[in-house]
Image (cartoon, helix red, strand yellow):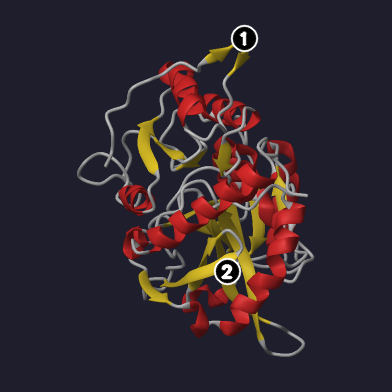
């Protein structure tokens, strides 16, 4: 069950702090959440966190949910380091005013022997929109993608991208389609040059609403996506076959365990694959998608290497959109984004058993092989 949180300072032995990897604490897991947000159930925590606790309990392990706040960071750190062999991060992006303090604490926990599920820098590298750019030229990402990190570059280069066709501009932050825009030039110039005063049709994935404005006005509007830490905009071609649905691959470490086929609402401008926008979800087993599973299995080592060579996240997703190979006419699967910060599985709570098994396997292996968990895989 979810415990009432009590804090215990680390036990001192001489001049050192007692190791987090002693036998009496290594079978305890802390699940971090943040209060508030639309991802919570009736008791205030995520509905897919409690099943993990139940599955670990059945294996004789202990676990608890701790709600992170910057004000409590020191106490939470000391408590976790003293009791836990691992943490699971279940904090949805946007549920904290800033993730800086949270990630600093997670790095310190990993540094002092607590297994990070996942490591905070893996969350950043996998979840950032430039993960797509880092994978361009691979089997799952074409060359025609780029990221902008400052306003002047975006203003100078985005019009040229639009000259090649309809584009999708994605902000790095946000969720459920917020700040993801399909941008199409209306009445393009015959010479192929797109100017800032030309009208563009902009459709946001959040709710498929449409706005028409001069391109320069849209670019000015997007400046907010470039401000602050992690500000960036991913620019990639719009794929018409999104109408057939986005395919989300649910990963448990390096294994495909579930696939969700998310089909946008049947409306003229709809391209969003979020439930909020009216998309319909179909849940399928991996054996229904053998070609895609093969692509994922081949791609995981490349993804891991190009995104920092961190240990794979415990739970993560890879989203694909169908395209057509112009040379062969065959289907292609193009990466849309990766999610690794707080992937939900509330529609398949039975997966908690597999998740608990993987946690136990990981922690037991680390206890035998290397008591000082490394941030990077060899």
Q: Secondary structure at mark 1?
A: loop
| Residue 44 percent across, percent down from the top left | 25, 39
| Residue beneath disc 1 | 14
Q: Is residue 308 above or below residue 5?
A: below
Residue at position x 63%, y 14% from top? 16
Q: Is residue 7 above or below residue 150?
A: above
| Residue 368 percent across, percent down from the top left | 64, 46
Q: For this view, does 346 lie left or right of residue 167?
A: left
Work out which residue is located at the far left of the displayed protein and give it: 42
| Residue 143 quadrant | bottom right
Q: For this view, does 349 lie left or right of residue 305?
A: left
Q: Is residue 256 above or below residue 4?
A: below
Would you call the spot at circle 2 few (<14 residues within 10 Å), some (14-19), or many (20 or more)?
many
Q: Secondary structure at mark 2?
A: strand
Q: Are marks 2 and 1 in contact (CB under 8 Å)?
A: no
| Residue 356 quadrant | bottom left
Residue at position x 27%, y 29% from top? 4
Q: Which mark is residue 320?
A: 2
Q: For this view, does 368 lie left or right of residue 139?
A: left
Q: Is residue 218 above or below residue 23?
A: below
- If the image is split into quadrants, where does the N terminus sit? top left
Near-viewer residue (218 or 145): 145
Answer whether residue 11 is visible to the viewer in this image. yes
Answer whether residue 205 is visible to the viewer in this image. no
Disc number lying in front (2 or 1)? 1
First along the sequence among labels 2 and 1? 1
| Residue 282 percent across, percent down from the top left | 38, 75
Residue at position x 71%, y 59% from top? 303
Mark pair 2, 1: CA separation: 54 Å
């Amino acid at each position: 069950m979810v415990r009432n949180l009590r804090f215990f300072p680390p036990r001192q032995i001489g001049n050192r702090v007692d190791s987090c990897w002693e036998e009496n604490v290594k079978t305890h897991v802390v699940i971090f959440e943040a209060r508030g947000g639309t991802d919570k159930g009736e008791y205030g925590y995520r509905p897919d966190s409690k099943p993990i606790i139940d599955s670990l309990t059945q294996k004789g392990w202990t676990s608890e949910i701790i709600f992170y706040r910057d004000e409590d960071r020191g106490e939470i750190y000391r408590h976790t380091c003293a009791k836990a062999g691992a943490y699971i991060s279940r904090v949805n992006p946007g549920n904290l005013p800033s993730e800086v303090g949270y990630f600093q604490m997670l790095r310190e926990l990993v540094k002092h022997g607590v297994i990070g599920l996942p490591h905070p820098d893996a969350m950043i590298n996998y979840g950032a929109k430039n993960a797509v750019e880092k994978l361009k030229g691979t089997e799952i990402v074409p060359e025609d993608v780029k990221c902008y990190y400052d306003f002047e570059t975006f203003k100078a280069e985005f019009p040229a991208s639009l000259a090649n066709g309809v584009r999708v501009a994605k902000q790095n932050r946000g969720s459920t389609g917020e700040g993801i825009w399909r941008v199409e030039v209306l009445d393009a110039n015959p010479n192929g040059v797109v100017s800032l005063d030309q009208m563009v049709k902009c459709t946001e994935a959040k709710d498929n609403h449409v706005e028409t404005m001069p391109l320069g006005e849209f670019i000015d509007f997007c400046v907010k996506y470039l401000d602050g830490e992690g500000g960036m905009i991913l620019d990639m071609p719009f794929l018409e076959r999104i109408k057939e649905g986005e395919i989300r691959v649910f990963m448990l470490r390096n294994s495909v365990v579930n696939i969700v086929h998310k089909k946008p609402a049947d409306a003229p401008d709809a391209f969003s694959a979020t439930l909020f926008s009216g998309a319909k979800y179909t849940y399928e087993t991996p054996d229904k998608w053998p070609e895609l599973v093969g692509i994922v299995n081949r791609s995981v080592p490349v993804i891991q290497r190009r995104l920092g060579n961190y240990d794979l996240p415990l739970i993560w997703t890879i989203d694909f959109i169908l395209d057509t190979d112009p040379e062969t006419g065959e289907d292609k699967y193009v990466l849309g984004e990766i999610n690794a910060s707080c992937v939900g599985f509330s529609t398949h709570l039975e997966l908690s058993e597999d998740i608990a098994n993987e946690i136990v396997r990981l922690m037991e292996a680390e206890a035998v092989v290397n008591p000082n968990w490394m941030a990077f895989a060899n």
